[in-house]
Image (tube, rainbow, N blue to C red):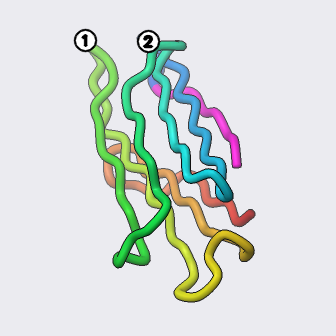
Amino acid sequence: MKFSFMVGVREQHRVDFSFDQFAGNLGILVDGQPLIKDFRLLSLKLTKRYEFTVGVEERHLIAIEKERKLLLAGFRPQKYRIFIDGRLVQSYEA
């Protein structure tokens, strides 16, 4: 799963998210620079939340939630939710 979104009005930043469901590699880039790298192969939690702040003069709190199924998660659709400053702005399922 890959998606990108823009954050900010006066000070814009591009956030890129990628997750390889079969290999378990997860990455989050902000303006092309790696911010978060994770390896998600085995986990007891069904929902993982990644939080970070972007911007200097115009700061925004970003949260990306990844929700997996209980069984055979690598072969089933997963849900992704994007929150900006606590407000749900986008969701995906793939």
Inspect the magenta stretch and tell me whether residue 38 lies in it: no
What residue is drawn where x is 35% and y is 76%?
A: 45
How many labels were placed on the picture? 2
Characterize the local packing of mark 2: few (<14), some (14-19) or many (20 or more) Cα atoms within 10 angstroms. Answer: few
Which residue is identified by label 1? 57
Position of 22 with respect to 68 (left or right) is: right
> Does the CB distance between marks 1 and 2 fall below 8 Å?
yes
Which residue is identified by label 2? 10
What residue is drawn where x is 41% and y is 43%?
A: 38
Position of 20 with respect to 39 (left or right) is: right
Q: Where residue 17 sits: x, y (%)?
A: 57, 38
Q: Where residue 57 sits: x, y (%)?
A: 25, 11
- Which amino acid lies under the numbered mark 1 shown in the image of this protein? Glu
Characterize the local packing of mark 1: few (<14), some (14-19) or many (20 or more) Cα atoms within 10 angstroms. Answer: few
- Element class at badge 2: loop
Q: Where residue 73 sits: x, y (%)?
A: 62, 76
Q: Where residue 5 sits: x, y (%)?
A: 60, 33
Position of 85 with respect to 14 (left or right) is: left
Position of the C terminus, as image quadrant, is bottom right
| Majority SS type along the magenta span | strand
Residue 90 — which label? none
- Element class at badge 1: loop
What residue is drawn where x is 33% and y is 53%?
A: 86
Q: CA distance from mark 1 to mark 2?
A: 9 Å
Q: Range of the magenta residues?
A: 1-7
Rendered view: 54 above or below 45: above
- Which amino acid lies under the numbered mark 2 shown in the image of this protein? Arg
Q: Nearer the viewer, residue 39 or 66?
A: 39
What residue is drawn where x is 62% and y is 60%?
A: 91
Which image quadrant for residue 48? bottom left
